[in-house]
């Protein structure tokens, strides 16, 4: 996956995660959130859950995995802010 693919998937995942969890970090913040979510979501789905789904390109599965990871990141950030 190229850098442009990471940016596009990160932007979509960050936007969706911020809509699900409330709030947002702007365009750059949502891209960073989505890329971090893609890394975490890909690791969780393959290593922990044993699924064959990961972030493989610009497709629906990758966006959903990255969004799930970004939601987990936002949840953890919310816990740390308390």
Image (tube, grey):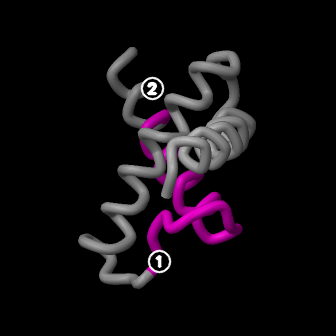
Image point 38% across, 28% down: which residue?
79
Displayed quadrant of residue 59: bottom right
In which quadrant will I find the C terminus? top left
Rendering coords of residue 69 (x, y %): 47, 51
- Relative to residue 61, is residue 38 depicted above or below? above
Which element carries disc 1, helix, strand or loop?
loop
The answer to which of marks 1 and 2 sits earlier in the sequence is: 1
Q: How packed is label 1: few (under 14 Cα within 10 Å), some, or many (20 or more)? A: some
Rendering coords of residue 68 (x, y %): 53, 55
Mark nearer the viewer, 1 or 2: 1
| Relative horizontal placement of residue 62, taking residue 81 as reference (left or right) | right
* Magenta range: 53-74
- Pick whichever, 42 or 6, lies toward us: 6
In contact (CB < 8 Å): disc 1 and disc 2: no
Could you tell me what secondary structure mostly forms the magenta stretch? helix
Residue at image mark 1:
53
Residue at image mark 2:
78
| Relative horizontal placement of residue 56, taking residue 13 as reference (left or right) | left
Rendering coords of residue 29 (x, y %): 57, 20
Rendering coords of residue 43 (x, y %): 31, 61
- Pick whichever, 59 or 16, lies toward us: 59
Instruction: Determine which of the numbered discs, if any, sits on residue 27 in the image.
Output: none
Image point 47% across, 51% down: which residue?
38
Displayed quadrant of residue 62: bottom right
Q: Is residue 61 magenta?
A: yes
Image point 39% across, 15% down: which residue?
81
Q: Is residue 65 magenta?
A: yes
Image point 31% across, 82% down: which residue?
50
């Amino acid at each position: 996956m190229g850098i442009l693919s990471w940016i596009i998937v990160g932007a979509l995942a960050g936007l969706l995660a911020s809509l699900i969890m409330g709030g947002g970090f702007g365009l750059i913040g949502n891209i960073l959130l989505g890329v971090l979510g893609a890394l975490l979501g890909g690791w969780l789905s393959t290593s922990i859950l044993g699924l064959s789904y990961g972030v493989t390109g610009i497709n629906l599965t990758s966006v959903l995995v990255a969004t799930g990871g970004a939601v987990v990141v936002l949840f953890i950030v919310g816990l740390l802010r308390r």
